[in-house]
Amino acid sequence: MSHTKQINYFKDGEILEEYIAPPSFFFEVLINNHFKIENFKESRCIEDCKKIDINYYNRFHEIPQFMAFLVKK
């Protein structure tokens, strides 16, 4: 299963590493490394977004831009 790693460097010296992949990639990595997934959330556009940018809303109201896992080892 493939993924893309993107590294962002900020002026204050902070580094943000992002991994772009389908949710199944992250579930597999966590499970294979013996983590217990306790919760999973994905971002959704809120209805107010329609008023600001309908094109953005139409593109992302069903396709999450971010995911968050609560895991325990």
Image (tube, grey):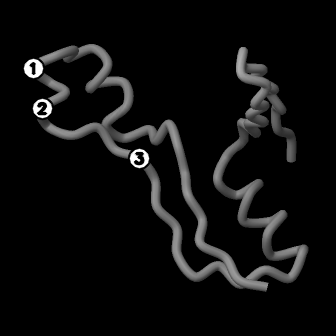
* Residue 19 x %, y %: 76, 39
Mark 3 or mark 1, earlier in chain? 3
The image shows residue 37 at horizontal and vertical percentages of 65, 79
Cα–Cα span, label 2 and label 1: 6 Å
Amino acid on which the number 2 mark rests in the picture? Asp
Front one among 22 and 71: 71
For label 1, the crowd category at 10 Å Cα-Cα, with few meaning under 14, some 14 to 19 and many 20 or more, is: few
Question: Circles 2 and 1: CB distance less than 8 Å?
Answer: yes
Determine which residue is flagged by label 1: 51
Q: Which of the two discs, 3 and 2, labels the residue nearer the N terminus? A: 3
**Location of residue 4 by image quarter:** top right
- Disc assigned to residue 48: 2
- Determine the residue positioned at 90% across, 75% down: 33
Seen in the picture, residue 12 relative to 73 is either above or below; the reply is above
| Picture disc at residue 67 | none
Which element is circle 1 on?
helix
**Percent position of residue 51, x then y:** 9, 20
Indicate whether 61 appears above or below 39.
above
The three-letter code of the residue at mark 1 reads: Lys
Residue toward you, 62 or 44: 44
